[in-house]
Amino acid sequence: FFFGFPQMEVTAVYVYPVKSCKGVKVDTAQVTELGFKYDREWMVVDKKNVCVTLRTVPTLGFIQPEISSDGTLGLNAPDMPSITVPTQTGGKTLNVKIFGLTIPAADQGDEVAQWLSQFLKEDGMRLVHYVPTCGRIADDGNDRWVSRLKSSKEWQVKFPDEYPWLIATDASLKALNASLTKEELPEGKTITMSRFRPNIVVGNTKAWEEDQWGELHVGSVNFHCVKACGRCAIPTIDPETAEFQGTTNNPIPFLTKKRDFGRGPLFGQAAVSFYTSGTVSVGDKVNVVSRRSEYEQAEDRRAPPPAWLPIRQTMWLGVGVVAAFAVALHIRQKKN
């Protein structure tokens, strides 16, 4: 306790073995240099070898992965037989596309491909596994957030959208639900944390306190919150129906009004870690090692500057210098 506030702690830990499928709630997750072990190690691609996500195939959210004690992947889905997928890393390699980047990935065979195609009602679906030599780097196209860490390290990632970890808080989710009107959130409905797909959920915080976080000590591991997460359309999908929602049962309209500062509606913190081992467990104490400055928080919220902005800033600086010189010259002439 600190001045009457209970100690922050981890209240939930999630691993998402297959990108865009259901998460697995665990008591403890193992930290690796690529994120949690088993997190987003597999991905579904279409017949053109392009990454498939909930954005285009929301029924992916009905597939429940599970990981056995020996690391074997299992998949379950409504009205489908369960399937076990022994990881294949030395067989056929596909060149797959994920957000415009082409990388190698290990194909997981025809049996699971047919299973996915049947359930998703899309021909040509295949499951691929991460290849350590793929060279995909955590970067959203603007590395100004990571550059704050003053490190030359590049964080290689598996198949997340951007960064290895996403951290959220119970208090912010509670504040979000409390802010929605009856028209926005029908009686009996709740926006659940599963909409936002975090890896680590922290309790005993203030709402939106995570905006200030820089470095966190969680259990035996330190994490660096590199930026607030600008949300896409995925949180608009109702996990129970796998359908996109309109103005009701949808957190995005509220977040757009109250939490969009030019870079999309924000919820949760994308994070990296210099640690290559360790664990995060439910009940682990969470301590804030450092906080972002007000300037960094403002930078975090705003959209990346357009390419022409430095030119415009330089132009106005030049105008300012000329104006200052003209004023000084005028004053000097008046004195004379």
Image: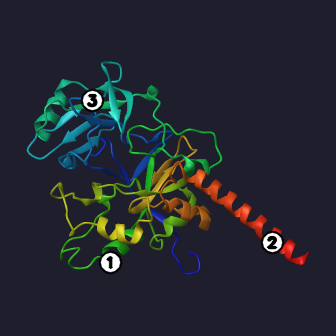
| Closer to viewer: mark 3 or mark 2 | 2
Could you say which is closer to the camera, residue 98 or residue 269?
98
Q: Position of residue 216 (x, y in %)?
A: 56, 58
Q: Which mark is residue 155?
A: none
**Residue 301, x across and y down, in percent:** 49, 62
Quadrant housing residue 248 = bottom left
Q: Residue at x 48, y 64 (%)?
A: 9
Residue 293 position, x and y percent, is: 62, 65
- The residue located at (56%, 38%) in the rendering is 154
Check disc 2 and report the residue beneath it. Answer: 330
**Position above or below: 84 against 9:** above
Looking at this view, is 73 or 42 the one in front? 42
Q: Position of residue 209 (x, y in %)?
A: 50, 69
Residue in front for this viewpoint, 236 or 295: 295
Which residue in the structure is indicated by mark 3? 49
Mark 2 Cα-neighbour bin, 10 Å: few <14, some 14–19, many ≥20? few
Q: Is residue 98 visible?
A: yes
Amino acid type for the residue under numbered disc 3: Asn
Residue drawn at 27 percent across, 28 percent down = 86
Q: Residue at label 1? A: 178
